[in-house]
Amino acid sequence: MGIKLSFELSDRDLRYFRTALKESREAVRDADEQDILDAIRQALTDIRRNEPLPDFVAQRLPVIESLIAMLLDEDWRLPRAERERLMAMFVYFSDPEDILPDDIPVIGYLDDVIIIELVTREMQHVREAYDDFCRFRNDYDREHADSVDAAIRRDRLDRRRQQLHQRMRRRSTRVSKLGNW
């Protein structure tokens, strides 16, 4: 039988994590994106070697993988600001000597999980837009199969992507005006 632990991060706690993420963002601006992706993939491989993982860590690995897929999706073309947020999270997560060193049994990934939660909440509208884009693309491809010209397909995807990018910016702006993370 499991135990559910719940705790609230104060504004001071959140500032602490925001500062750590901001430092990672600064590092991202000059870093090679491919190097960061290689590091996060290696970190995921290393983490999986330590199985069985705590469930609170294992449950977030698919989230990280979906964010990597979103970042790499050439049809989606994630905007720069959102790319930097993800890369900063990847830099933080792949650093084994962050706030809590990752080699501390059970709790070593707790700070990484907090960062993942904060970034995924911050990017909720981006993830929703991307999910809508993937559904649109899959439906379009299924409906038209091989009968559509590649240029027409690209135009339809571009148009839908632009609509969804505008929607995610509107929603993200609205949330940031409310003062949420």
Image: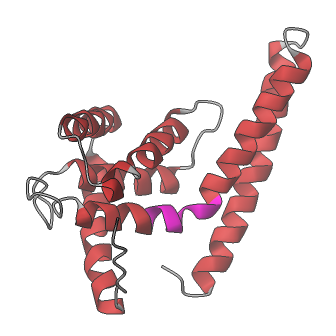
In the rendered structure, the answer to whether residue 74 lies left or right of residue 112 reads: right
Q: What residue is rendered at 75% in x and 51% in y?
A: 164
Figure check: 180 above or below 67: below
Q: Is residue 106 visible?
A: yes
130 left or right, relative to 55: right
Q: From this view, report whether residue 41 is shown above or below residue 127.
A: above
Give the quadrant of residue 143.
top right
Along the viewing direction, whichever of 181 and 162 lies nearer the viewer: 181
Residue 24 falls inside the magenta stretch: no
Residue in the image at 38% along x and 60% along y? 116
User: What is the quadrant of residue 57 in the picture?
Assistant: bottom left
Instruction: Please state the extent of the stretch shown in magenta in the rendering.
Output: 119-125
Q: Position of residue 41 (x, y in %)?
A: 30, 34
Closer-to-camera residue (82/125): 125
Q: Position of residue 132 (x, y in %)?
A: 74, 46
Where is residue 43 shown, x and y percent of the image? Answer: 23, 40
Q: Report the side of 147 relative to 99 (left or right).
A: right
Residue plotted at (8% across, 53% down): 103
Quarter where residue 178 is shown: bottom right
Magenta segment, prevailing SS (helix, strand or loop): helix
Residue 123 covered by magenta stretch: yes
> How many marks are shown on the rendered structure?
0
